[in-house]
Structures are given as C-alpha cells and as structure tokens.
Amino acid sequence: MLKWIEATGKTEDAAVQNALAQLGLDRDSVSVEVLERARSGFLGFGSTPAKVKVTYEVPDEAPAPAEEPVPAAPVRETPQPAPVAKKEKEPAKKDKAPAEKAPAPQAKGGDLEDRIRAFLSGLLDHMGVEAEINIAPKTENGILVTLEGPKLGALIGHRGETLDAIQQLTNYAVNRGRTHRVRIHIDAENYRAKREESLKRLATKVAAKVVKYRRNITLEPMNAYERHVIHETLQDYPDVITYSTGTEPNRRTVVAFSRGKHAY
C-alpha cells in the first residue's frame, strides 16, 4: 500500500529531510516529487519555502477475522429411566499404552558464523565451485563475507547479478526464524570495491552534467546497495539532490538539479 506526506523547508533538500525525519526512513525507501520550489524573494520579502510530496510503501493491512456465530443452547430433554442391563463379565484389563515421549526441545539457531558457513558451503558445492569462505567480525553495518579462489566469475555474473542473488539467499537462510535480522554482505574477487569505485566516478560525472545543463538525469536500474553508493557520493555535491523512484527490480536513482542545495 502506498502512502504519502507533504513537507516544506527552506530548500528542496530541507523539505525532503523534514519528511524523512517524520517517517523515520532513508532516501532510498521513498519517492520524491517537488511540488513547489523555494523562492528567495526580494531583500528577504516574499520568500516562499520549498514543498515536496514524499511517497512511501507500507504493508497491506490484514482483514479483520470474521466473528464466529455463537452456538444455540442445546434443548434439554426429560431423562428417561435407563433399562436394566444384564451384568456382563468385564473384559480383561489391557496394559496401559506407553506414554508418548515429549518432543525434544529444538536447538537454537546457533552461531551466525556457523550458519553462514554451512549455508554457503552447501550452495557452493551444489554449484560446483570451490572457494574459501572468509567471514569478518560483525559490525554495525552487518557481516562481510568474502569468497576467495580461482575463476570465481561464475559467482559474480553479469554486473554482479549472480553475486546479488547469492547474497539475498544467504540473508534469507541465515535470518529465517530470527527476531533481529543481520545484514550479510557477500563479495568475491573484490568485485564490490571495484564496482563501488566505478559507481562513484559515474555519480560525479552525472552530477556535473546536471549542474551544467540544469536538468535531472535518471540512472539505470540498480540494487539497493548501488543506489546507496550514488546517494552517499553526492550527498555533499553542491546544487544536486538525489532520490530513488520506481519499484524493484526497476528502482532507479534520480540526480536532480537543486539550486542552493544544503547537504544533509
């Protein structure tokens, strides 16, 4: 379900920041539409704030369960005297059935590193790829797992699509049944670092065009990690604002011109 709010600020960036603060979301989780651009006025008079519309997605509400009908009270009947039955021999008492054993308590999920290593080992074996699994200590950004070995191109795929799929599967398998999810990042042959440097160069090049020609540029579809690199690279770039639009897997980053932009 899509919802939206409107927010104002001295600049377009400030208005977006006010909306994100109210929602508790980041830029990559919303779509932004500039309704009114900020006007400085003359000598401080007649100035108007910027106004934006921020759209975000929330889970659909589950329908309320239907009320079960109350069963009618049973009709009481007058008891009739039971016929006297002939006394029969009582059957021999059977031995009591052995009590059912209580199910053994399920083991806990175990250590995260063990779960990651076990899942990836099975997945790589199924793919017929030999790779060494190196798991870095957990940080506030999650856990970094690097795969090392010869000829790991099959694990990366076109523009990292296979590597992204492995990362998604690992996150699902390891976090299944856990109350607190942990973000797991998968890398191979230092692909992520190389791709990040390429995206930073692209972001800077596109931002220069946006400022020069004063028009917005929409980038090709990217995953959440790549969009985050674009946002982070241009967060301090003057006169430029970035936001994401569309839905997965075709969600794109927009690099927009915004005069007098203040970084946030």
Image (cartoon, rainbow, N blue to C red):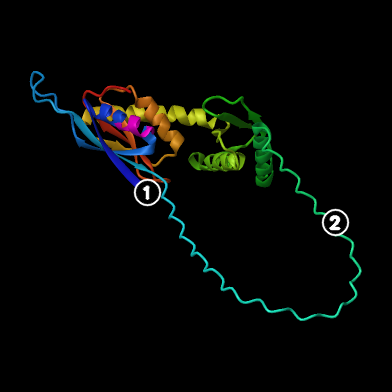
Q: Is residue 203 magenta?
A: no
Secondary element under disc 2, as helix, strand or loop, is: loop
Residue, x 50% and y 64% (percent of image)?
A: 70
Label 1 or label 2, whichever comes before in sequence order? 1
Residue position marked by numbered label 1 in the rendering: 1
Depth check, mark 1 against mark 2: the one in front is 2
Q: Nearer the viewer, residue 97 or 158?
A: 97
In the displayed structure, does residue 19 sit left or right of residue 128?
Answer: left
The secondary structure type at the circle numbered 1 is loop
Q: Residue at x 13, y 24 (%)?
A: 40
Residue 13: x, y in percent? 27, 28
**Residue 205, quarter of the rendered image:** top left
The part of the image, by quadrant, that contains residue 174 is top right
Image x and y of residue 44, in percent: 11, 19
What residue would you read off at disc 2?
A: 98
Residues at discs 1 and 2 in contact (Cβ within 8 Å): no
Q: Please tell me whether the stretch drawn in magenta is mainly helix, strand or loop.
A: helix
Q: Amino acid at mark 1?
A: Met
Residue 161 screen position, x and y as percent: 51, 42
Residue 22 in picture, x, y percent from top left = 33, 32
Q: Residues within 10 Å of mark 1 (few under 14, many from 20)?
A: few
Q: Give the quadrant of the C terminus.
A: top left
Q: Amino acid at mark 2?
A: Pro
Tell me what residue is drawn at x 81 percent, y 80 percent: 85
Of residues 81 and 150, the one drawn nearer to the viewer in this rendering: 81
Res 49 seen here: yes
Q: Is residue 50 left or right of residue 147?
A: left
Name the residue nearer the viewer: 92 or 220.
92
**Residue at the spot x=89%, y=65% of the render?**
94
Q: CA distance from mark 1 to mark 2?
A: 54 Å
Q: Where does the magenta region start and end?
A: 19-26
